[in-house]
Image (spheres, rainbow, N blue to C red):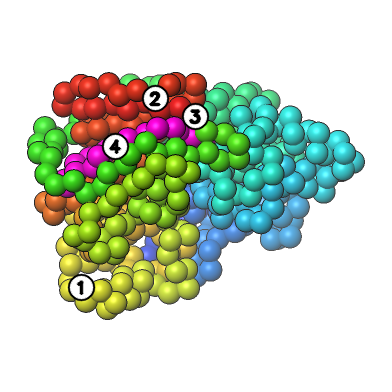
Amino acid sequence: MDKVIDIKALSIYSDQETIVQALSLSLVWGKPVTILGETGSGKSLLVQAIMGALPKGLEMEGNISLFGQSGLSQRQIEEHWGNDIAMLPQEPWLSLDPIMPAIKQISLVNWLVRGFAKEKSRKVADQALSLLGLDDSLQKVPSHLSGGMAQRLAYLCATAAGGRVLIADEPTKGLDASRRAQLIELLKKHSEFGALLTITHDVEVARSLGGELIVMRQGEILERGDCEAVLTNPKSTYAQELLSAWDFRAPSSTRSLAKQNLVQVKSVSKSRGGKTLFDGLSLTIKAGEVVGIVGDSGLGKSTLADMILGLTDTDSGSITRSEKFAPAKLLKLYQDPPSAFCQTITLEQNLRDLCGLHKIDFSKVSELMKDLKLDNTLLNRTPDCVSGGELQRFAIVRVLLMKPKLLVADEPTSRLDPIIAASTIKLLLEQTRRIDCALVLISHDLKLIDQVSDKVIQLADFAPPHLLDAEPMQTVTVS
């Protein structure tokens, strides 16, 4: 069977460390390969090496052959981009043009790469956007899309040129359950007529795609084999821990004893692009309380959280915040951590600037990094030289240093493997409860939200506003 991609003894290293160690794998037509592993294990660097796009400061040894050809120059590798090999990157907002409407981004691929006439390019783009539920977002720029919507747009841009080989880096991150299932089906169809290499920390994505499964940790392959066989009977200790952590259970002590009112939301309504996101929503958030917000992509989860923080105005109704704490105590943990850090300075300098501005003891950084399983050597790197999951944990370190009174966490575990995700949620709950900080948790993971929340706001299409009283949790469903 012809090998589309053949990697032999690939190592990736910097001056200080070896990040990927002597990795070998082959990708053939019709048989998907999925790499499952922790954040920071070198999965995304492997993809960048295949595409000839390693970050500056990193070198590689070993051999990568594409379509039976090895020793290709950078220009020869780039000739395969789009036409033969498509890549769906982990951070959609960084891969999309920030000022170009969604339909134009796909139309340009159809026109420039596939050679379609402009009218046909737009028609095909329109059909593709409708297929993935983006027909109301044709003229929106990426910053006006939710995380899940941006991820779907990035998928359409990556596959528009018709490349038979698709490399997908965390393709379902930020997607709600229905869109996640839809994208998985598209990936499975792609693997039937082409070749598919998927990078993920999501056990269920790996299980759904099937084929060969490779389990990685700290740059090494620990286990490989038929996907179902590995997931049913894992041999390595790490794979066993990964599967165990996937069935996360919140500690019983996470429920709060509600205290003072921090935020009162009364009869709030909000529309966007002619669509009503919610109408007549009322809610009280108390100190130390966990409020979960769930719902499909594009229904206004992040918009509601921004209104609670005062970052976005309401159309009607009122939001009253306690006068007992300063604006700096109202903080947000953003869904897209790369855009929340200065990219030109080290992570240490990012944190030192914060500590200097707010007179925070810098020694607290090491304590939080240890709790979040972050190595101190990462402080010497710039944000673009750590994994998405590591950067997300640095963002958590940064907000916890500020000891907020109200923290909005927008998809805080979407970039994390199950083991790190479970410990991160546990730490967030412990730290916020310790300082009586209210936590507004946005997630597509209804199971997680149910386990840790005192109140749940569920945003859904076509559902009239109503409040269901249930102990110990309240659920608010709004249209």
Image quarter hosting the C terminus: top left
What residue did someone put label 2 on?
Answer: 465
Alpha-carbon distance for marks 2 and 1? 43 Å
Q: Is residue 373 left or right of residue 229?
A: left
Query: In the rendering, which numbered label is found on residue 180?
Result: 3
Alpha-carbon distance for marks 4 and 3? 29 Å
Amino acid type at image mark 3: Arg
Alpha-carbon distance for marks 1 and 3? 41 Å
Alpha-carbon distance for marks 3 and 2? 26 Å
Amino acid type at image mark 2: Pro
Marks 2 and 4, the one that precedes in the sequence = 4
Marks counted in the figure total: 4
Identify which residue, 369 or 464, lies in the foreground.
464
Marks 2 and 1, the one that precedes in the sequence = 1
Segment tinted magenta in the rendering:
277-301
Dot 4 alpha-carbon crowd within 10 angstroms: few under 14, some 14 to 19, many 20 or more: some
Marks 4 and 3 close (CB-CB < 8 Å): no
**In the image as oriented, which residue stretches furthest toward the right?**
117
Dot 3 alpha-carbon crowd within 10 angstroms: few under 14, some 14 to 19, many 20 or more: some
